[in-house]
Structures are given as structure tokens and as C-alpha cells.
Amino acid sequence: MNLYEYQGKELFARHGLPVLPGQVAASPEEARDIAASIGGPVVIKAQVQAGGRGKAGGVKLAQNPDEALEKARAVLALEIKGLPVRRVLVTQAADIQRELYVSIVLDRSRKLPLIMLSAEGGVDIEEVARTAPEKIVRRHIGTGGLRPYQARELFQPILRDGKLVAQAADVLMRLWRVYNDGDCSLAEINPLIVTPDGRVIALDAKVSLDDNAAFRHREWGTWRDPEDETPGERLAREKGLSYVKLDGDIGCVVNGAGLAMATMDLVKHYGGEPANFLDIGGSSNPEKVTAALDIITGDANGVRAILFNIFGGITRCDDVANGIVTSLEKKPLDIPLVIRLTGTNEELAREILSANGLSATTQMDEAVRMVIGKAQEVTA
Ligand code: GDP
Ligand code: MN
């Protein structure tokens, strides 16, 4: 899960990172009232999960509450990289002397957290990485964690001034705690600014949380924005299915992530395009099957045929068959369905299916070719 800037800054503030006071607003009037309570110039910042908001007109300075209202109105009317701006952060404006970049990100290839630091902050860091990679300092954090002297060493050549180095090193130590204690896969500050009066402040926050750790962070639930999910994504999350919508026309319901990947590969191999990745998981439960069909028929426009590919192990084929039958009784399908199943309780599954006018093959290859053929018939 990715956090919005205002959520990231809340998390930062909890860990004692220096951020400027601010509050999120959903209307121009709210923005005006927040600006009035902050006093002085404020910045109105579009809350969308996309970089480059500044360039897209999503970051605007306002001198007083009335101006804040006008600017908020303008920013709330924007769409940035296809994302509508539903909220703005109204925050105290800062004077900027320098803009740095600092982040901690999981380096999967080294299996270690990686600090990235650059004196060229405020700009698109991917651009710096492309054009001038030598301007980014990279340092892995070993299993012993990050020590204050290491943090100071990193900032010393960039900032030089002892007081600034001490503040920036403290920021990095706290960012490390945000990342490590908070189960993040990314914690980024861009820009980390130095003000003319010698303060170091996090002016932006970009945080990605590792969803695998959600079970030990109750507070994450309050950060989830239901409007960010499609109905299908929500249903998948609630029912414990892994679901990613894709652009193709063949809906795939599979048990196990590896088999799901193999199924998608095979669909591609035979010239088809999968409409989704959907893993109903290893456990056995007809309800999950019903949910899977609801997701595929409800969320995806342009699905022309559906393939079930089940390798029965802990997942029992009869449970899947029952799920399919129940689901079709409730809501008949108007597109072809191809079922492949093999393994635990396969015979029972076949009986259930045939009693309901359905059939299944045991061969994955055959099933994939069949479903592609049926999808093409539907198109023709
Ligand atoms: P992003 O473009 O989506 O990364 O949004 P940022 O929050 O990083 O803001 C983009 C740029 O706007 C920053 O790099 C700053 O140059 C500028 N900016 C943001 N807040 C302030 C502020 O309070 N004062 C000033 N002077 N500039 C700001
Ligand atoms: Mn930024």
C-alpha cells in the first residue's frame, strides 16, 4: 500500500521527523479555514499518488486564506496522470535554500535496505539516476542497522556545516526507524530542504508499506482509502484472494500463484491475453470461488471467456465445483466457461459438474487452447 503525502507526513511526525504543520482538505472552503488556522503563507498540494505534482500544477503557493481558497479550487479541479485530485494538503510554506534527496528503499537483489542520497533534490530522481548516476550516493544498511556516525558520514560531504550535518543525520536515523519499525518498502523525502535560517525539514513524503506486514499494523487499516480500490479489488482483499486486473479478454481463476503465472504464460503462448491474475489460494472454500467469479464478471469489461485451472491439493476439486455451481445458480454466465481440474476429489468434482450440465478436462494445455478458441468465437 502506498501512502498519500499527508499520511506519510503523519507517520514521519510520529517518529519525530521535522515536517511543517498542515492538514488535509476536501473542499476549497476547508482549505481556506486550515490556511487561516496556520496563518501566513501556505502551500496547497494535490494529494495523488503520482510524482511530478509540482510540474503538473498541483503545488501552489497562497499568501492568505482567500488565496488558499482560490488555489485549492484550482488544484481540486485537476487530474494528474489520470488521477483526480480529491484532496489537498494545506501546509505552512517554507523558504528554501537547498533541496536534497534522501530515501531508504528495499534492494531486493541484495536483500538489504538501501540508502540513496543526492545533493540534487526536488527534481525527478529517476531523471538524475539516468543522466548523472554519480550524483546519487548509495549505501546499504547491514543487519546491524544504521549507526549515527554512518548517517553523519553520508551527509558530511554534502552539507559540511556541522549543525546541518547533525540535523540531517538525525533525519536519516529517524527515517530508518520509520522504514524499519514501520515495515516499509520505501521511505522517501524529496525534497529534504535546508532553510535560509539553517533548519532541515522534510517537505515531501513518499511511503510504501509492505502489505505482508499488515497483520501487525492495525493502524494501516485507517489509511486505506476505499475510493482507491475498484469493487473487485475490495472484494478480493476482503475474501483473501490475490487479484490483479489486466487488459486481456480471458478471465483466469487459478489456485496458487505459481500455477497462476504458468497459466497466464500458457494463455499468452497460444496467442491469448489474460484479463487478470487471480489466485484463489491454497485453502479450500466454495465461497472463494463464488467471489472469484463475481470479481471477474463484475470488474472486467471485455472478458470473453473464463478459464478455471485448479490443481487439487489442499484445495479440494469438489469445493471448487460446488463454488462454480452455486455461483452459476445465483448468476448465470453469459460467456463461455472452461474448467480444468485435477487432484484431490477430482472424481467427486466431475460428478457435481456433470449433474449440473458442466464438464471439465484434466489437461491444462487443452483447457487453455479451448478457452482461447471460445473467446475467439465470441468475438467473431
Ligand atoms: P512533487 O513534485 O510531487 O514531488 O511535490 P513536492 O512536494 O516535492 O513539491 C515540488 C516542489 O515544489 C519542491 O521541490 C519545491 O521546489 C516546491 N515547493 C513545495 N513546497 C514548497 C514550499 O513550502 N515553499 C517553496 N518555496 N517551494 C515549495
Ligand atoms: Mn517531491
Image (cartoon, rainbow, N blue to C red):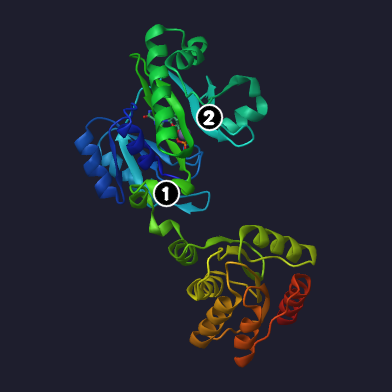
Secondary structure, mark 1, is: helix
27 vs 216, nearest the viewer? 216
Report the Cα–Cα distance between label 2 and label 1.
31 Å
- The residue nearer to you, when weighing 45 against 340, is 340
The amino acid on which the numbered mark 2 sits, given as a three-letter code, is Val
> Which label was assigned to residue 214?
1
Q: Nearer the viewer, residue 153 or 257?
A: 257
Is 4 placed above or below 322 here?
above
Residue 378 in the image, given as x and y percentages of width and height:
70, 81
2 or 1: mark nearer the eye: 1
172 lies above or below 329? above
Which sits earlier in the primary sequence, circle 2 or circle 1? 2
> Which residue sits at x=67%, y=62%?
259
Please say if the residues under marks 2 and 1 sit with CB atoms less than 8 Å apart: no
**Residue 242: quadrant of the picture:** bottom right
What residue is pinned by disc 2? 123
